Each structure stands twice: as C-alpha cells, then as structure tokens.
Amino acid sequence: MNPELMNAAKKAEDFCAPIFGEIDENCRFWTEKVLRAFVEERVSAAHLGGTTGYGYDDAGREVMERIAARVFSAEKCLFRSSFASGTHALTVMLFGVLRPGDTIISVTGEPYDTLQRVVRGKGVGGLEDFGIRFDCIPLTEDHKIDLDGVKDAAKKARVIYIQRSRGYALRPSLAMDEVEKAISAAKESNPNVLVLVDQCYCEFVEQITPTQAGADLMAGSLIKNAGGGVARTGGYIAGKKEWVEQCAYRLTAPGIGDEIGCTLDTNRDHFRGMLLAPEVTAAACKTAVFAASLAKQFGFGAAPEPNDHRADIVQTLLLDDSDLLIAFCRGLQAASPVDSFAAPEPAPMPGYDCPVIMAAGAFVQGSSIELSADAPLRPPYAVFLQGGLTYELGKLGVLSAMEAVLKIKN
Ligand SMILES: *Cc1c(COP(=O)(O)O)cnc(C)c1O
C-alpha cells in the first residue's frame, strides 16, 4: 500500500487508542450481561437443535427468546428468522399495536426509506390503507428531538415513533440520553401513549436499551448488530409483554402468536450470534472510529467525528464527488472475503428513490454487521460505512477503500 496511507493509518490508530479502550470497556459490560443470561436460562446442548412444521414446544426458541429479553432488559422478545428483514420486524411492530382510527407520529423526522410505503403507501397495504394516520415532526435545528413537540404529539397520538440510527439522512444518530428524555416527555404528557423505537444498528453500542428506558417496544434486524455476524436472517421485537404478544398475533395469526414458528437449524446460530454480538459490535465501532480518523487526515468530513459519542455503528464519510464515492465502495469490496473480484455499480433498489451503490462482500447477503458501505448517488455523496466482523478485517477494508479514493483524487 501507498506509504502516505500507511503513515496516516499509523497516526489514526495512535489517535484512536483511548477510544478503543472505551469500546473494549463497553464490550466487557455486554459480554458479561449476555453470558449471565445464558447461565440464568440454563442453556443446554439440547436447545441448540431445532424443530420443523409448526414448531410447537421448541425449547431452543423459547430459551433464546428469554435470553434476548434479558439482554435487552425487556419483558418479552420475539427473536426469529421468520422476520425477513429489519423492515419486516418494524412493520409487524407497527401493525401489531396500531388499530384503525389511530395516529402515529414520528418525532425523529422522516423514517428510513424502506418504511416510507409502510407508513404512507396507499394501495400496497400501508398504514394509510387501514385508516391509520401517520405524521412526523422534524428534529430541531441542532438535530435534537423537539421535546415540546413530543409532549404535544403524545396528546394526539396512539404511538410515538423514534428512529435512532440515521438511515441515509445526514443527521447524527440519537444517543440514549436523548431517547430517554423523549420517552419521559411522551409518557408525562400522556401515560397511555405507546413509544416504539427503531433500534437498528444501535444494539450493544450503549449500555442502556430503549426498553429499559421505558419504551414499550423496539425492533431490529439480525443481519445487523443483534445477530452477531452469525445469524443468517431474521429480526426481533422486544418490549412490554402485552404489546409483544400483540405483535406475535400479527407475525403468525391472531390467537396463535408465539406458540408456533419452527426454527429448522437456526437456534444454534442465534445462540452463538448473541454470545458474539458484543465483540462483533465492538469491532464495528472500532472500524468506524478508525475510518473517521483516517478520512479526516485526507481532508474528508466525517460524521460522527472520531471522538464523538456514538449511538450506533454507522460512520458517514463526506466524499463530495460521485466518482470518489464509487471508488470507495469498489476499494472496500476488493478487500472483502467474499466476492472481492466484483465491482459494485449504482442501481435502482426497491424502497429507495435514487440509485444506490452497495459494497458488501459478506457471508450473508446484505449483511451490514459484516463490513459494508452503501450510498445513495446524490449530493453530498456521503458514504455510509458500517460493520466489520473483526477490527483487523474492518481496518483492511477501510484502507483498501481509501487507497482507491486516493488513486483518483487530484
Ligand atoms: C437497516 C435499517 C432498517 C431496516 O432495514 P432492512 O434492510 O429492512 O433490514 C430500518 N431502519 C434503520 C434506521 C435501519 O438502519
């Protein structure tokens, strides 16, 4: 590799050392919490196998879901490979608790691209088709949740919706202290309002969870943090027992709920993924911090900044140019363990309103806890980088991406 780049990498790692120390400390906290849940639930070899058909009395699934509930500090959890994606889990969460005539208000601005048609889509079975009103209030100018707006919204709404990670928006992800304030404001204003949280990319990054802070439900994807890079598909919904049960009736069938749902051979992956998730999430956080520090040395903007508090594993780098953006994604792909020879191309994607480029040389299709970079092809040509099964793999991917960028810059 180019010596200027190797020099910058060394500097970046020196700068990042104390930040990595904090990430390791956080990883210790979560590893202990997860292991304690395994011990308390008395996981045995018999739980690692799975069931077929209806999946009645799937002891492995039941124990896994109790472990996930303990880890997330929730009363109950659905943790299943039958969720096809994070969007599916979030959709089941919304349809699980909302009823015709209800109003849901997002207090973190527009939700993630793939949720647009869930909350608005007419004629595709979105909330609107069921007479459920969706509204949203933007973040304040300094990207905080508008707490007066939340209080106001809670008086009019059945559900207050919070999306913590940034999606493809250029705003910071929302830290738990901010989310806690919003939950308290909503509940103070209307004790009957439900608070639902999109927790995608945030699991294991901070030590408090939204459900611990009073949210009624949260949901996420198993091909992001919560699957630990092991789960091959799936999602979860965690929270208050009453509402998780309503979601289970939506996921399977009314009155049947979580009693069925065979696991085939996924239990072993889910246990192992959960056990490794704190470590893998820490590797992703370190990769993000390293990338931010490296990019800044070459004059690119980074959000968050290397030493900013992090709420999720996503790192935005502002490349300001579509060719540099494509080069970054191709360079990252070239240092992937799978499909390293492929060159990603921007293309239209279902659920997105402009071409999107995605680099992911992953063992699981589309997995973004494995090192990945993606970006909508629109100004300011920001790339969204996340994942890394190990820090060393993440670092190599970022170096390869930056090398490709430097080759064509200037
Ligand atoms: C990833 C993500 C989702 C869900 O996306 P899927 O691709 O359907 O798993 C939802 N919200 C946010 C903020 C996300 O990052």
Image: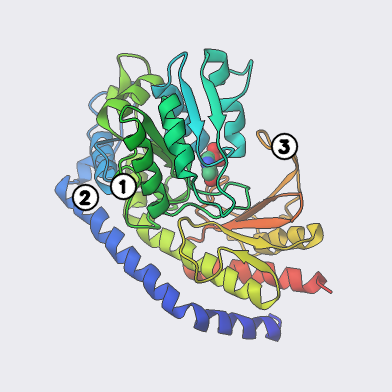
Tell me, yes or no, if residue 5 can be seen here: yes
In the picture of the structure, the residue carrying the numbered disc 3 is: 353
Residue at horizontal 75 percent and vertical 43 percent from the top? 355
Check disc 1 and report its element: helix, strand or loop.
Answer: helix
How packed is label 2: few (under 14 Cα within 10 Å), some, or many (20 or more)?
Answer: many
- Per the model, the C-alpha gap separating discs 2 and 3 is 43 Å
The kind of secondary structure element at disc 3 is loop
In the rendered image, which quarter is residue 245 located in? top left
Residue at (62, 22) in percent of width and height? 121
- 285 sits to left or right of 371: left
**Residue 253 in picture, x, y percent from top left:** 37, 16
Residue at numbered disc 1: 271
128 w.r.t. 185: above or below: above
What residue sits right under mark 2 in the picture?
A: 38
What percent of the width, then of the height, locates residue 289? 52, 69
Q: Looking at numbered disc 1 in the image, what kind of residue is underneath it?
A: Phe
Q: Amino acid at mark 2?
A: Phe
Disc 2 versus disc 3: nearer the observer = 3
